[in-house]
């Protein structure tokens, strides 16, 4: 890139490609910055002096084509490094559904669950606002309707089109309001076990709802959008969690960590790192219910067994 | 070495900056220009607005660098055809690794 000196950078791929392009774009525009892990949202980057960024997603998941977020993997310490900056929002997003048609079913599910986690978090975070909530709710409706179709038949053009739109609007929503616990836990799981990001964050949706319900009833907006009975906040939560679990099950996603083939011994050995990474993840700080490292550990243990969160 | 998100000040500010308690001070709706549909990267001539409208006028050098991975090279090639039809010279870098390792950037 440095020698070619482009004035247009085009990322064609999934989340990794778009995120990496953002990183390369920063280094191209700002060769004085060498450590991407130290770029804070408060820094002035002054991008767009040399090139514009165009994102062409080939998965319907990350939403990176419409956000200022990028996640890198620090392989030296097996840790996810998220960065977020307003200037990193691409100039143009090109959503071409036929580029997603060849996604295999497992990747379709992983990417689709990433959309669902973005949207669910964007509704329930305290920073949800009038701009983000309608987009996130619409994305939830669309994922529940179209992801099963895209999973069953990858050539379903309408489902692919709806899913790439859902991914984009969920991206816009969480790009403004942030994600919370699904992503704290999901990032940790993905880094330690090298599992697909979307699968990890989608897996934690029910646990995140259950942990947060003591301090928020924002999930009622999701119940309303999905026409889930909610005579009381608690019943609404139970029905919503049951609905999400049914949805995950229908997509062949395990509901407990042990069902991913992770042995108890291995889990216990890696638990301190899972806790350290989830508690240290920036998304933790956007949770409606503040969480301690001890609670992170308990959530992980409950998730391993597939138990309901009752604390 | 620490990461930006380990800064205690930022940790304290993150929920405050985004919290509903200060909603009303500044809300930025920041999105790209979005083109969506089955014809956004057309293989032939197009009547009416096209994706190229957003690219050509902003890129005087008309030099496009495409970043992709092995799996998506075929789509990058379609994008190349589209860009070249708009007068761009292109180069593809297809070495992105899974989960975007820092050393790959």
Image: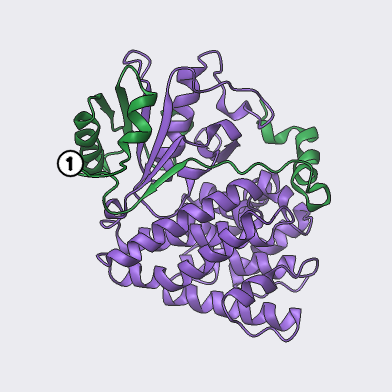
Chain colours: A purple, B green
Percent x, y of residue A43: 66, 25
Q: Quadrant of the C terminus of chain A?
A: bottom right
Seen at 68% across and 77% down, the residue is A237
> Is A257 situated left or right of A21 in this image?
right
Q: Is residue A188 visible?
A: no
Q: Quadrant of residue A181?
A: bottom right
Q: Tell me where residue A282 appears, x and y as whole percent.
A: 68, 44
Residue at 55% in and 74% down = A244
In the displayed orientation, state which residue is furthest to the left.
Answer: B44
How many numbered markers are drawn? 1
Q: Residue furthest front?
A: B48
Q: Quadrant of the N terminus of chain A?
A: top left
Q: How far across and how far down the image is residue A95, in percent?
A: 36, 49
Name the chain under label 1.
B
In this orientation, which residue lies closer to the viewer: B19 or A265? B19
Task: Please tell me whether residue A191 is drawn above or below residue A52 in the rendered image.
Answer: below
Residue A23, position in %: x, y? 48, 29
Q: Nearer the viewer, residue A114 or A8?
A: A8
Q: Is residue A32 left or right of residue A158?
A: right
Helix, strand or loop for disc 1: loop
| Residue at figure coordinates x 37%, y 37% from the top left | B97
Would residue A200 be visible to someone looking at this image? yes
Please say if A265 is above or below A251.
Answer: above
Q: Residues within 10 Å of mark 1 (few under 14, many from 20)?
A: few
Q: Is residue A238 above or below residue A254?
A: below
Query: Residue at horizontal 55%, vertical 13%?
Result: A32
Identify the residue under disc 1: B45
């Amino acid at each position: 890139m440095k020698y070619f000196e482009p004035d247009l950078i085009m990322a064609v791929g999934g989340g990794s490609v778009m995120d990496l392009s953002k990183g390369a774009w920063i280094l191209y525009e700002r060769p004085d910055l060498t450590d991407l892990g130290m770029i804070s949202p408060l820094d002035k980057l002054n991008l767009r002096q040399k090139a514009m960024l165009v994102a062409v997603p080939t998965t319907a998941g990350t939403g990176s084509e419409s956000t200022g977020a990028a996640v890198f993997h620090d392989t030296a310490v097996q840790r996810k490094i998220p960065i977020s900056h307003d200037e990193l929002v691409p100039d143009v997003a090109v959503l071409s559904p036929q580029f997603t048609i060849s996604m295999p079913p497992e990747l379709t599910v992983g990417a689709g669950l990433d959309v669902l986690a973005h949207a669910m978090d964007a509704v329930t975070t305290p920073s949800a606002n009038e701009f983000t909530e309608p987009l996130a709710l619409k994305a939830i409706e669309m994922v529940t309707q179209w992801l099963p179709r895209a999973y069953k038949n990858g050539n379903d053009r309408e489902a692919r089109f709806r899913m790439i739109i859902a991914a984009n609007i969920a991206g816009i929503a969480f790009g403004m309001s942030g994600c919370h616990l699904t992503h704290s836990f999901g990032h940790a799981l993905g880094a330690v076990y090298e599992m697909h990001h979307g699968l990890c964050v989608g897996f934690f949706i029910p646990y995140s709802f259950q942990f947060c319900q003591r301090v928020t009833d924002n999930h009622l907006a999701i119940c309303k959008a999905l026409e889930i009975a909610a005579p009381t906040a608690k019943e609404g939560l139970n029905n919503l969690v049951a609905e999400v679990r049914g949805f995950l099950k229908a997509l062949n996603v395990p509901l407990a960590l042990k069902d991913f083939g992770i042995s108890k011994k291995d889990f216990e050995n890696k638990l301190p790192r899972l806790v350290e990474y989830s508690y240290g993840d920036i998304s933790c700080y956007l949770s409606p219910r503040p969480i301690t490292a001890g609670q992170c550990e308990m959530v992980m243990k409950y998730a391993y067994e597939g138990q309901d969160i009752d604390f | 070495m620490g990461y930006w998100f380990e800064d205690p000040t930022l940790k304290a500010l993150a929920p405050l900056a985004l919290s509903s308690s200060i909603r009303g001070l500044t809300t930025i709706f920041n999105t790209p220009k979005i083109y969506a549909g089955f014809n956004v990267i057309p293989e032939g001539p197009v009547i009416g607005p096209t994706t190229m409208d957003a690219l050509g006028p902003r890129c005087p050098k008309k030099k496009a660098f495409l970043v992709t991975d092995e799996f998506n090279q075929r789509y990058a090639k379609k994008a190349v055809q589209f860009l070249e039809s708009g007068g761009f010279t292109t180069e593809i870098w297809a070495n992105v690794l899974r989960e975007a390792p820092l050393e790959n950037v």
